[in-house]
Amino acid sequence: MNFIKKEYHQVISYFNYEFDENEIAEKFGSVGRFLEIASHESDDGEAEGEEPTDEERDTFIDFINESDYDREDDWWTDRKGGYEVTFQLGENE
């Protein structure tokens, strides 16, 4: 008999980047400008500095997406027990 248990989880994924400050300055003019753009893309508090242009925003997103990172997943529903479980019979031969 084939039997299936499905668990429905929620996870928070942390993507940790290590950037070279010279590369940031080359792309964005300065580390400070990079941080200003990042603050406008964040929902963690108030944005700082001048609103980024569409070109700066695109460059920022491309820079992040093309960079290497270490990923850490927090399966918070798994450790808190706050997830749904269903059971079903699978296909039997």
Image: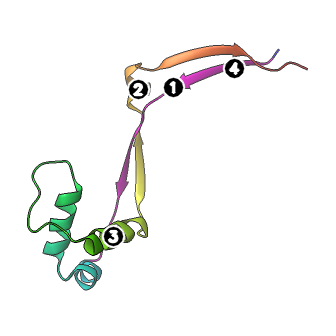
Which is nearer the N-term, disc 1 or disc 2?
1
SS type, badge 4 = strand
For the residues labelled 1 and 3, say whether their Cβ atoms are less than 8 Å apart: no
Which region is colored magenta? 2-20
Residue for point 41% across, 58% down: 70
Looking at the picture, does residue 6 appear above or below residue 60? Answer: above
Cα gap from disc 1 to disc 4, whole angstroms: 13 Å
Looking at the picture, does residue 75 appear above or below residue 47? Answer: above
Residue type at numbered disc 3: Asp
SS type, badge 3 = helix
Residue under circle 4? 4
Q: Residues within 10 Å of mark 3 (few under 14, many from 20)?
A: few
Residue type at numbered disc 1: Tyr
Q: Is residue 37 magenta?
A: no
Q: Locate residue 18 relative to residue 90 in the image: left or right.
A: left
For the residues labelled 1 and 2, say whether their Cβ atoms are less than 8 Å apart: yes
Residue under circle 1? 8
Residue type at numbered disc 2: Thr
Residue under circle 3? 58
Looking at the picture, does residue 21 appear above or below residue 15? Answer: below
Which is nearer the N-term, disc 4 or disc 3?
4
Residue for point 32% across, 73% down: 59
Q: Residues within 10 Å of mark 2 (few under 14, many from 20)?
A: some
Q: Residues within 10 Å of mark 1 (few under 14, many from 20)?
A: few
Cα gap from disc 1 to disc 2, whole angstroms: 9 Å
Write down the quadrant of residue 69 in the picture.
bottom left
Q: Residue furthest front?
A: 54
Which is nearer the N-term, disc 4 or disc 2?
4
For the residues labelled 1 and 4, say whether their Cβ atoms are less than 8 Å apart: no
SS type, badge 2 = helix
Cα gap from disc 3 to disc 2, whole angstroms: 34 Å
Q: Nearer the viewer, residue 25 or 19?
A: 25
